[in-house]
Amino acid sequence: MALLFFFLLAVSATPLSSMAAAFPSFQTLNTNSHFFNPKLPPNSLSSSKKFEGSSDLVNLRYHMGPVLSSSPINIYLIWYGKWSVSQKLLIKDFISSISASDRRRRAAPSPSVAEWWSTVSLYTDQTGANVSRSVVIAGEHSDLHHSQGTDLTRLSIQNVIATAVQSARFPVDHRNGMFLVLTSQDVTMQDFCRAVCGFHYFTFPSMVGYTLPYAWVGHSGKQCPEQCAYPFAVPAYMAGGGPGALSPPNRDVALDGMISVIGHELAEVASNPLVNAWYAGEDPTAPTEIGDLCEGLYGTGGGGGYIGQVMRDEGGGTFNVHGRNGRKFLLQWLWSPVLKACAGPNALD
C-alpha cells in the first residue's frame, strides 16, 4: 500500500499485516506437509484500512497505462551492499520459479510460484495483452562498497540505479526491462521499517538516462524483522511474539520474509509499472494495488487475524507454494480481476 508519498517519489509501500492461530492440523496428500491456519498478533505496521479480500470495498480500475506484457520480463538485479552466495541463490531461485516450466527445467510441484504468478498474468493493457508469464534475470550488478552510502532515500535510489547502469552496461531495455534493487542489512532507507518494507516506481531520465520501472526491497534482519519479516517474526511485546513466531521454510527469517515482499512488489510492477495502469483509488501517487488489497492473506480462511490455511513441512517450515530446486516459499495472495477477490494457488475452495 502506498504510504506517505511525496510527488515524484516511489509508490507502493509494502507494510505488514496482521493475521493468525491454529485450526487442528490434518494430513494432506503430501505426507510431509500439514495444513494449519495460525493466528498471530497484528503487525505493528498494519494499516487500519484492511480489505481482507472483500470485493465490497474494492474498486480496482484500469487507468489505460501499460503492463509488462513483452516476454520475457527481464529483471536487472542490483545487489547493494554485501550479500552471501547462499542469500543470492535463494532469491534467484525464487525469481526463476516465477516462469512456467520449459524443456530444460522441471516444473515445481503444485501449488507453485508459477501458479501464484498466473493471477498477475490475468491483468491486461488496452490492447488486450496480458502480463507476461515468463520472468528471467537478464543481468546482475554488485555494489559492494555502497557507492551512494548506507543511508538512502527514495531519490538517491535513482543514483544507485544510475551507477549500476554505467558499471554493468545494462542495455536500454524499454520493452522488457525492470530493475530490482536489494539493499543489505546494514543499509537504511527513507521510511524503511517505519512505514514500508519495499516500494516501486520508475527511473527519471534526468538521473538514469531513461524511464524504466524499478522495485526496491530491503533486508530487515538487523533493523526490523518484526515488521518486514512478518509472519516469521512479530513484535516481542505481543503475546507469542519475537523471532520465530512461525518457522521460515528456508530457515532464514529475514530472507524468507523479504521474498514475500519481493513477490508483492514484482506483481505490482508488472501490473502497474508506470503507476498509470491497475490500481484502486484516485491518487496515482498513493495507489492501492493488487498486492496491497490482499496484504496479510496467505491461504483459504484468512482474515480477522488469521493468515489462512498454509502448509507446514516435516521440519516445521511454514509455506504455501513450491519453487524450483526443491525450494518452498510463503507468498501473500494477490487480487484477481476475474474472481474479484484475493486468490492463490493453495486455495482449498
Image: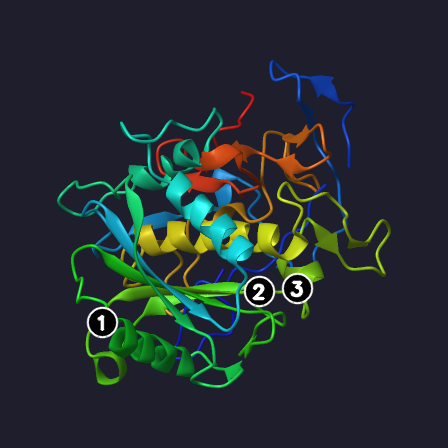
- State the image coordinates of residue 324 (x, y, percent, origin top left): 45, 35
Q: What element carries label 1?
A: loop
> Alpha-carbon neighbours of circle 2 within 10 Å: few (<14), some, or many (≥20)?
many
Horizontal placement of 231 versus 114: left or right? right
Q: In which quarter of the image is residue 113?
A: top left
Q: Is mark 3 on a helix, strand or loop?
A: loop
Horizontal placement of 34 versus 112: left or right? right
- State the image coordinates of residue 166 (x, y, percent, origin top left): 25, 78
What amino acid is at disc 1?
Arg
On the image, numbered disc 3 is attached to which residue? 221
Q: Is mark 2 on a helix, strand or loop?
A: loop
Query: Depth check: 167 or 203 in front?
Result: 167
| Residue 343 in sight in this render | no
On the image, numbered disc 1 is attached to which residue? 169
Q: How far apart are marks 2 and 3 (CA)?
A: 6 Å
Q: In which quarter of the image is residue 164?
A: bottom left
- 266 over 302 or under it: above or below: below
